Amino acid sequence: MDPYRPLDDDARALARTLLEGAGFGALGTLRDGAPMVTRAGCLWISGTGMVLLLSDLSDHAQALAADPVCSLLVGEPGAKGDPLTHPRLTLIGRAEAADKAALRDTYLAARPKAGLYYDFTDFRLVRIAPAEAMLNGGFGKAYRLAPADLSAL
């Protein structure tokens, strides 16, 4: 039995809200073949997708350089209730270089505190090129999104 519902306008709106509202996410990478999850700052840029500003000195950036396969979980539980009833979205894909210079103004307009380190030479901007996304809108509200669904958000 397939637990995923057909994607509808409400699910698309929820996915957009989660992606646009994410200031950070749980980044899953592979390090020496073992899974590793870290917190990373992120920004959804319409027309570009999800970007991450990463220091080459960090374990997760080094893991992505060795194997770009990754996932990013966004959506935080609210203050009340069961955390598993709150919506969340997982992007699954590959990290690829993003144009740090071209996206500088957009990134810093949304994340002005990153101006302290954005231009450091060890920081690079990566984009998650999605293979798919899984949206969980709460109990019984699971959806799969294809790359085309995400690029339409």
Image (cartoon, rainbow, N blue to C red):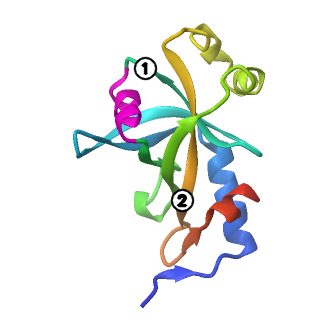
Q: Which of 115/87 is in front?
A: 115
Assign the C terminus to one quadrant of the image.
bottom right
Where residue 144 appears, as percent x and y from the top left, is: 56, 70
Q: Secondary structure at mark 1?
A: loop
Distance from the alpha carbon under mark 1 to that under mark 2: 24 Å
Please provide the residue range marked out in magenta.
58-67
- For the image shown, how many numbered marks are present on the structure? 2
Q: Residue at x 56, y 11 (%)?
A: 117
Disc number for residue 65:
none
What amino acid is found at the position of numbered circle 2 in the picture? Ala
Q: Main secondary structure of the magenta part?
A: helix
Identity of the residue drawn at 77% across and 46% down:
47
Asked whether 122 or 11 is in front, the reply is 122
Task: Assess whether residue 10 is covered by the magenta stretch.
Answer: no
Drawn side of residue 135 relative to residue 44, left or right = left
Mark 2 crowdedness (10 Å alpha carbons): few <14, some 14-19, many ≥20: some
Residue 131 tag number: 2
Mark 1 lies on residue: 56
Per the image, label 2 sits on a secondary structure element best described as: strand
Tell me the crowding category of disc 1: few under 14, some 14 to 19, or many 20 or more residues within 10 angstroms, Cα based: some
Instruction: Give the position of the N terminus as an image quadrant.
Output: bottom left
Give the residue drawn at x 42%, y 57%.
83
Kindly identify the amino acid type of the residue bearing the numbered disc 1.
Asp
The correct choice, above or below, for 11 with respect to 120 in the image is below
Q: Decide which of 22, 66 is in the foreground and name it.
A: 66
